Image: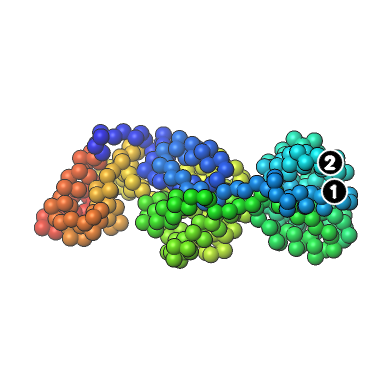
Amino acid sequence: MSESDADPGTAAELPLAGYTVAVTAARRKEELGALLDRRGARVVYAPAIRIVPLSDDTELVAATRRVLEAPVDLVVATTGVGFRGWLEAADAWDLPLVEHLRDARVMARGPKARGAIRGGGLVDAWSPESESSAEVLSHLLSGAEGPLEGRRIAVQLHGDPLPDLVEGLRATGAEVLTVPVYRWVLPEDVAPVRRLVAAVLAGTVDAVTFTSAPAAASLLAVAAELGRRDELVDSLRDRVLAVAVGAVTAGPLEAVGIPTRQPERARLGALAREVVARLPERDPVRQVGAHTLQVRGHAAVVDGRVVELAPGPMGVLRALARRPGTVVPRAELVDCLPGGGDGHAVEMAVARLRAALGAPLVATVVKRGYRLAV
C-alpha cells in the first residue's frame, strides 16, 4: 500500500498516530502497550528488567523468621504483588505470618499495597497521598505513629533496598527488619534493550515510558555497557520524550539530568494519557498556505488527517519543516534520504511526498531546491 492509499485516521481519533513509543515495563507491558496502540502509536517493547521472586529463597525464609521472633509494631507494605507474595510464601511454609501481624499497624505505600493488605486478611492503617516511600518516612518521623525508638518495624522491599527509608528509620533507634520479597535483574534477553538504545540515538523512537525506577536504571546501565550512556542521556534530554509513571520511577533519570513528564496519578491509564498530552504538543502545527501541517515521528498530519510516510519522503519533509519557507538545496536534502542518493533520488522523494500529502505544501524553487509553501 502506498502512502496515498493509507488511511490511518485523523489526529483527533488517534492522537498518537505517527509516533513510536517504547515500553520498558516488565509487568503489565501488554496492558500499557494496548493503551498506547489504541491511541494510534507504534509500540516498541523492550522490557528493561525482570522480576526474580524469592519464594524459594533462604533469604526470604530467614527474613520472615526474624519477623516472627517477636511482636512487630509497624509494617510497611511497598507493593501489592510483593506483599501478597510474602503472605502467600509464608502460608506455603506453614509460618503464621498473618496472625503475627494482626496487632501491628500496617502502612500501605499505595492502593495496590492496600489491596494486598486487605486481601490477606489484615487492616491497613494509613497510606500516603503521594504513594512514595519518602512520605511514608516523613509520616513515621513526624511521631504520628508514636515514638519509634526500640520498636520493631518490618519493611517489605520491592527490588530496591530503599536505603533512605530503612536508614532513616534505623536512625531513630528502631529495629528495622527488611523483607526482600523479590528483586530486579536484567532481562535474560538484553537484545531488545540494546535495540531501544540504538533507536533512541537514531531518533526513530519518539517517547520512552517507564513504570519502575529499576527499569530506568537498567536502560542507563545497558547504554553504559555499550559505551553510549552520555549519548542516550543527551537524546532523552533533547529529541526523545521520557515519561515516568511517578516521581520514584523518574528518580534515576532525573539524577542524570533527564527531564521527565509524569501524570498526577501513578496509574497506567494516566501514564498513557500523559503521553497523549505531551508528545503531540512538542511538534508545532504550522499554517502552510490554506492548509495546516504537523510533522510527527513517521507521519504528517495535514488538515487533521494522518498521512504515514516512507523514510525518504519523511526525511525530506522534516528537513523542509525545520526551516519553513526557506529554500533547502537538493544537495542538502540528499543527506536526509536513508542511504543517501543523488538529485534524482531527491526529486523522486519529493514526488512521492506530494502525492501522499494530497495538498500543495511543497514548492519547487527552480535551480535552487524546495521549500514549504508558507
The Cα–Cα distance between marks 1 and 2, rounded to whole angstroms, is 8 Å
- What is the quadrant of residue 99 in the picture? top right
- What is the quadrant of residue 307 in the picture? top left
Residue 68 numbered mark, or none: 1
User: At x 69% / y 58%, what residue is drawn?
Assistant: 162
Residue 350 left/right relative to 94: left
- Say if 266 sits above or below 234 in the image: above
Pinpoint residue 221: horizontal percent, then vertical percent. Answer: 52, 61
Circle 1 packing at 10 Å, graded few (<14), some (14-19), many (20+), is: some
Which residue is denoted by mark 2 in the rendering? Answer: 96
Going by the numbered disc 2, the residue's amino acid type is Pro
Going by the numbered disc 1, the residue's amino acid type is Leu
Pinpoint residue 320: horizontal percent, then vertical percent. Answer: 26, 54
Residue 32 left/right relative to 155: left
User: At x 82% / y 53%, what residue is drawn?
Assistant: 66
Pinpoint residue 205: horizontal percent, then vertical percent. Answer: 40, 50
- Say if 163 sits above or below 243 in the image: below
Which of these two is toward me, 364 or 173? Answer: 173
